[in-house]
């Protein structure tokens, strides 16, 4: 028997080499795929971790704002624009990220809830003197303001225990973009009737809230408080023209705020999240959270 029959041919050696190369290529491909998936999983884990850190930091900042407002109420009974809590907090470093925020009082805006009927009829009159005064003061037509109030009442009929936000009510109307922007600048919609904080209100909001107050009178009040805020209602009342002072509804004005908006921005690597929360402060208790939501970065 010839020994050559027991030797593998060159063709068999070539096939074995090709198979070996294919196996190596398959293993290498699987290893690459596994590595890519592992990197993807790690990236997803990192994103989730950053999201959790941003959310946790934002809610911690909101709770810090609540503590700040509670301590403020315990230390004084006046809210004005020179208080430390009104200063926006610039981005500051926290573990692996940054966070910034702003605490705003909102009782300086004219509260449209004050114009809603209180007799349970859920109807709005076109001839209401307070509505006409508020519309004129804020620079919108009486008809436009009536539309907004009726939109608010429409929501309340459908959901009696709810109070829509002003933006939601505006979306239910055909008001122009300019009129919407004007109302959002000077007005707000809160869950209850509230006095206006005269230390924060602009001239338009003051005129809307106080019967008989002219534009000149409102500007004079703002100029007066720029030097020293009104520390008592008596000091504010004495600054009013006599004709306005004698007819002033004292329940319409205040030097304290009860509603506040907290706006928070949190950055953790590629994650940038905005949050805002509405707070209600009653006395010296810890303010309650009425709602918290994600906010667009333009709003926060």
Image (cartoon, rainbow, N blue to C red):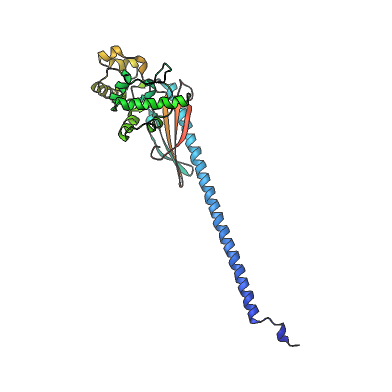
The residue that appears at 25% across and 16% down in the rendered structure is 241
Q: Which residue occupies the foreground of this view, 158 or 217?
A: 158
Q: Which residue occupies the foreground of this view, 29 or 232?
A: 29
Q: Can residue 82 be seen in this view?
A: no
The quadrant in which residue 208 appears is: top left
Q: Which residue occupies the foreground of this view, 111 or 136?
A: 136
Q: Can residue 2 be seen in this view?
A: yes
Q: Is residue 121 above or below residue 180?
A: above
Residue 83 position in % (x across, y down): 37, 27
* In the image: residue 207, left or right of residue 104: left
Residue 23 position in % (x across, y down): 62, 68
* In the image: residue 42, left or right of residue 84: right
The quadrant in which residue 190 appears is: top left
* In the image: residue 2, left or right of residue 110: right
Give the quarter of the figure containing the N terminus.
Answer: bottom right
Which residue is most to the left?
216
Residue 142 position in % (x across, y down): 30, 24
Residue 201 position in % (x across, y down): 33, 25
Which residue is most to the top?
246
Q: How many labels does the image show?
A: 0
Give the quarter of the figure containing the C terminus.
Answer: top left
The residue that appears at 64% across and 81% down in the rendered structure is 10
Which residue is most to the bottom?
2
Q: Is residue 91 above or below residue 12?
A: above
The residue that appears at 60% across and 71% down in the rendered structure is 21
């Amino acid at each position: 028997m010839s020994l050559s029959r027991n030797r593998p041919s060159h063709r068999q050696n070539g096939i074995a080499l090709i198979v070996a190369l294919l196996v190596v290529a398959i293993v290498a491909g699987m290893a690459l795929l596994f590595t890519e998936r592992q990197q993807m999983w790690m990236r997803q884990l990192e994103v989730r971790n950053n999201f959790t850190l941003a959310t946790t930091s934002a809610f911690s900042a909101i709770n810090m704002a609540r503590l700040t407002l509670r301590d403020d109420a315990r230390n004084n009974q006046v809210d004005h624009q020179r208080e430390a809590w009104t200063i926006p907090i610039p981005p500051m470093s926290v573990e692996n990220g940054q966070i910034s925020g702003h605490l705003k009082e909102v009782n300086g805006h004219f509260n449209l809830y004050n114009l809603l009927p209180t007799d349970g009829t859920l109807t709005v009159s076109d001839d209401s003197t307070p509505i006409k005064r508020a519309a004129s003061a804020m620079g919108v037509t009486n008809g436009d303001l009536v539309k907004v109030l009726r939109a608010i009442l429409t929501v309340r009929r459908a959901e009696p225990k709810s109070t829509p936000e002003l933006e939601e009510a505006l979306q239910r109307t055909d008001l122009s973009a300019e009129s919407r922007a004007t109302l959002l600048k000077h007005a707000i919609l809160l869950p209850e009737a509230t006095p206006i904080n005269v230390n924060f209100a602009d001239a338009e909001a003051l005129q809307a809230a106080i019967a008989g107050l002219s534009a000149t009178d409102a500007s004079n009040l703002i100029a007066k408080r720029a030097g020293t805020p009104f520390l008592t209602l008596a000091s504010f009342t004495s600054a009013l023209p006599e004709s306005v002072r004698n007819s002033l509804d004292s329940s319409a004005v205040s030097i304290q705020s009860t509603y506040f908006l907290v706006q928070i921005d949190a950055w953790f690597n590629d994650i940038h999240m905005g949050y805002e929360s509405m707070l209600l402060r009653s006395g010296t208790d810890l303010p309650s959270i009425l709602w918290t939501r994600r906010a667009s970065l333009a709003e926060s």
